[in-house]
Amino acid sequence: MEIIMSENNQDKKDELDYYFGGIQEFSLEEIESEVLNESVYLDVFAGSDPSFKENVTTFNNGLDLINKLNVYEYDYKVEEFPKYKFSSDHQIGLMADELEGILPGMVVTDTDGKKLVDYSKLTPVLTKAIQQLTETVQEQQKVIDDLRKKIN
């Protein structure tokens, strides 16, 4: 798989499977089998227009789910798994098998049976958890303000 960075990517895009500087569409199967296996870094845009969706309900338990997750520091076994082209930098992250038990849609299994985390799917859950924490802080601040008024 060839990835070319050039100043004029528009001329090259028809010749390449992947290119920098533009939007390229991939099916889920292509992302899982080709893009992930090539360790290409890309931004993924998910269709989020309301017209695409049905059975929409409010999600309420972000904080409960996030609190079930363990966060780890670790180093990848770069030499043992060269095909994954892991970074040799020290990492902070989740364990896919643990996450799969809590939020199964955020873990995929590759053709070798190895589990991979789709961290981008955590964003809505984290957003809800932050909203829940903000609400708690605001409620606590109101109690503090009321108690201060009583003291003064």
Image (tube, rainbow, N blue to C red):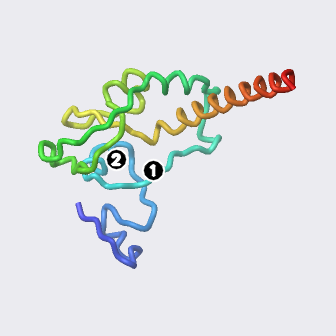
- Position above or below: 1 against 136: below
Q: Label 1 to label 2, Cα distance in Å?
A: 10 Å
Residue found at x 23% / y 50%: 88
Q: Are marks 1 and 2 in contact (CB under 8 Å)?
A: yes
Residue 54 position in % (x across, y down) = 61, 31
Residue found at x 22% / y 42%: 76
The answer to which of 94 and 139 lies nearer the viewer is: 139
Task: Determine which of the numbered discs, if any, sits on residue 31 in the image.
Answer: 2
- Position above or below: 36 against 64: below
Direction from residue 34 to residue 10 in the image, left or right: right
Task: Determine which of the numbered discs, if any, sits on residue 44 in the image.
Answer: 1
| Kind of residue at disc 1 | Val
The answer to which of 140 and 105 lies nearer the viewer is: 140
Viewer-side label of 1, 2: 1
- Crowding at dot 2, Cα within 10 Å, few <14 / some 14-19 / many 20+, comes out as some
- Crowding at dot 1, Cα within 10 Å, few <14 / some 14-19 / many 20+, comes out as few
- Residue farthest toward the left in the current orientation of the protein: 80
Residue 51 position in % (x across, y down) = 64, 41
Residue found at x 59% / y 34%: 130
